[in-house]
Image: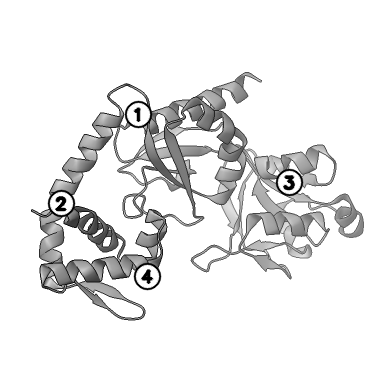
Amino acid sequence: MNPSLLPSLAWFALVARHGSFTKAATEMGVSRAALSQNLKALEKQLGTRLLYRTTRDMSLTEAGQHLLDSLQPSLATIESALRDLGEASGEPSGLLRVNMARMAARHFIEPHLSEFLDRYPRVTLELMLDDGLSNIIAEGCDAGIRLGESLAEHMIAVPITQTLEMAVVGTPDYFKRHGKPDAPADLVHHNCINYRYRGGGLHDWEFTMPGSGHEFTVEVKGRYVVNDDDGMLRAALQGIGLIQHINVAVQTAINESRLIRVLREWCPPFPGFYLYAPSREQMPLKLRALLDFLVEKREAIARV
């Protein structure tokens, strides 16, 4: 076998896994054009077409699918060997890709980035910020961080935060002009800033009936809609209206008296964020390092 074919074969498998030249090029840190030219050269060397290409789509030819099916077991063996070699010294190493919501990254990962990377100098951390519920395996990630209530049944999960609460907040000036709601039903009289999910739906505000524990949602109305939680918070701080957000995201503004919390008795604690991964068996040291680090931070907060 010609050893010079190995890099191109690995790139071909990566493109096929993503179903996209753009995504594969981004992961490899090369240009889409360079990757495309490399695979064209591979097809020329092999004397067969591996991919069908259009301006928008890409698919495997029959020969390409056969080659991919043959390559995958060998590439998995090589990847495992390299991982074992990198971890032979017992030191976490390699690229660690974690999928998570932006809010989770902002409040639970980014404040500790420097400490984690200093502690594990051979680990490269890549955060895939996604407010949807992506399949971490299909996205090529090692783990994901999501709210406990969103976890898939087949994933193992470890809590990395304490319990959280939904908080309804507004500025002092807003409440001076419009008054405070005493119950969720009163929100019909308020301008509520809406959050739109990536899939297109609006966030229905979540409440629990005091005393009974009955959970329900309220479809709020307002004159401003945004699909970014930071943008939602900035709008609330301008006094435009009320928002419902996870308490950690608004706590600083509450402490500084820029926001006032209402309806607190209607928003009890709920399970927080979890790190989830496909399996505990043969968990890579790099992932174990991140898991233990985040649990350590969770316990430190609990002791405060």
Report which residue position mark 3 lands on. 263
Alpha-carbon span between mark 2 and mark 1: 30 Å
* Crowd band around label 1 with a 10 angstrom C-alpha radius: few (<14), some (14–19), many (20+): some
Alpha-carbon span between mark 3 and mark 1: 44 Å
Report which residue position mark 4 lands on. 33
Alpha-carbon span between mark 4 and mark 3: 55 Å
Q: Nearer the viewer, mark 4 or mark 3?
A: 4
Camera sees residue 282 = no
Report which residue position mark 1 lands on. 285
Task: Give the mark nearer the N terminus: 4 vs 2.
Answer: 2
Which residue is at 35% across, 81% downward? 55
Q: Nearer the viewer, mark 3 or mark 2?
A: 2
Residue 265 placement: quadrant = top right
Label 3 secondary element: loop
Task: Give the mark nearer the N terminus: 2 vs 1.
Answer: 2
Numbered circle sitting on residue 3: 2
> Type of residue at label 2?
Pro
Q: Nearer the viewer, mark 4 or mark 1?
A: 4
Q: Quadrant of the C terminus?
A: top right
- Do the residues bearing badges 4 and 1 touch, measured as CB atoms within 8 Å? no
